[in-house]
Image (cartoon, rainbow, N blue to C red):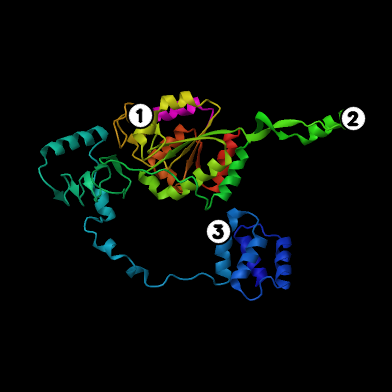
Amino acid sequence: MFASFVEQLRVAGLPVSITEYLTLLGAMKRGVAEYSIEDFYFLSRATLVKDERHLDRFDRVFGTVFNGLERAPGDPTTALPEEWLRKIAEKTLTEEEKAAIEALGGFEKLMETLRQRLEEQKGRHQGGNKWIGTAGTSPFGAYGYNPEGVRIGQADSRHRRAVKVWDKREFRDLDGDTELGTRNMKIALRRLRRFARQGAATELDLPGTIRATASNAGSLDLKMVPERHNAVKILLLLDIGGSMDDHVRTSEEVFSAVRSEFKHLEHFYFHNCVYERVWKNNRRRDETSISTWELMRTYGRDYKLVFVGDATMSPYEVVQPGGSVEHFNEEAGRVWIERLTAHFRSAAWLNPSREGYWRHTQSIVLLRDLMQNRMFPLTLSGLDDMTRELSR
């Protein structure tokens, strides 16, 4: 059984050699894990897995070989919460119905039509295809479906299709103390570190002290040097809110890993695309925002710029003045991305969404082109590729 287990691990892509296999057999012979499947799991994982990126594959092979996978209890077709089934405002359309709904004809036409509806509408509507309301196919309202519309009065995004969001947006800061899952990220980010001795001489220079003492006929002559610090400077711009709510945990892990690895770190937030302002604190973003021009004047070209965001939005937000879902931006988002990437010598974009979906999302294609293909998936291999790019 052990031999077939190792064989299945190798089929799954884990580089398990005869050395690790013999180590496992030796530990079993000495009774490290005698009659406990749990003890054997931890022992085999410790002896056979050399790279933490392979832990998930190891778990799947272990569960298959030793029948350790449990089925979820109950019938999955009847396990839906009652509120999901009774939410009247959530209208479900077939693919044919969705395909039959057409966009109004572009950004300007959409906003002009909204202004007309606001002037004409006198009451509440539900389930229609014209007025501002709920559960319909109108491009204005909440809990319905339209391929291109303005979301009004809905708590969260559902289809990621809104061109504008007519609500006050409340975001929260990322937790920089999150530690779960950050260890691998820290290891990957260490490729970027570049140490230098700067500042006051506070650390004992042992080789220098030995040489100086020998030259001084054995009389102790202490030599001090400045402490070694990571000299790399990172400017982190974090997308917050909207579709990024699905990636809060991953973003927190990245933020925590970067903050622990780099002494010279500055971070700011933006929503969807960078425009004329970014901010430091989401609860007080009006008071803590600074202009993007000021950002570039404050932080020099030696900073390495890293965007973190799923780049999933209406394409108008990237290419159209006034395209922002929150305010009327006088210049398109692409203008600000081009300015930032021109100012900072090294820049990259980390995207937490699956790379296989990128080519199907127009805004991701646009931003990836603006970043000159320096967009990387927020995975361990993606972090490796990003650090190689920023280290050039």
Judge whether residue 194 can be spotted in this image: no
Side of 51 where 169 appears, left or right: left
- Is residue 145 positioned above or below 298 on the image? below
From the viewer's perspective, is residue 36 above or below residue 102? below
* Quadrant in which the C terminus appears: top right
Say which of marks 2 and 1 sits in front: 2
Q: Position of residue 304 (x, y in %)?
A: 54, 32
Circles 2 and 1: CB distance less than 8 Å? no
User: What label does residue 56 carry, if any?
Assistant: 3
**Residue at the farthest top position:** 297
- At a point 64% along the width and 69% down the height, the residue shown is 4
Tell me how far mark 3 sits from mark 1, CA to CA.
42 Å
Q: Residue at x 43, y 25 (%)?
A: 294
Foreground of the two, 269 or 79: 269
* Span highlighted in magenta in the image: 332-346
Q: Which residue is mark 1?
A: 332
Question: Which sits in the foreground, 390 or 83?
Answer: 83
Q: Amino acid at mark 2?
A: Ala
Specify whether residue 118 is in view.
Answer: yes
Tell me, for residue 185, which label it has, or none: none
Contact, CB < 8 Å: mark 3 with mark 1? no
The residue type indicated by label 3 comes to Asp
* Gap between marks 2 and 1 measured at Cα: 71 Å
> What is the secondary structure assignment of the residue under circle 1?
loop
Choose the circle earlier in sequence order: 3 or 1. Answer: 3
Of badges 2 and 3, nearer the viewer stands 2
* Res. 217 mark: 2
Image quadrant where residue 34 sits:
bottom right
Residue at the spot 51% in from the left edge and 27% down from the top edge: 344
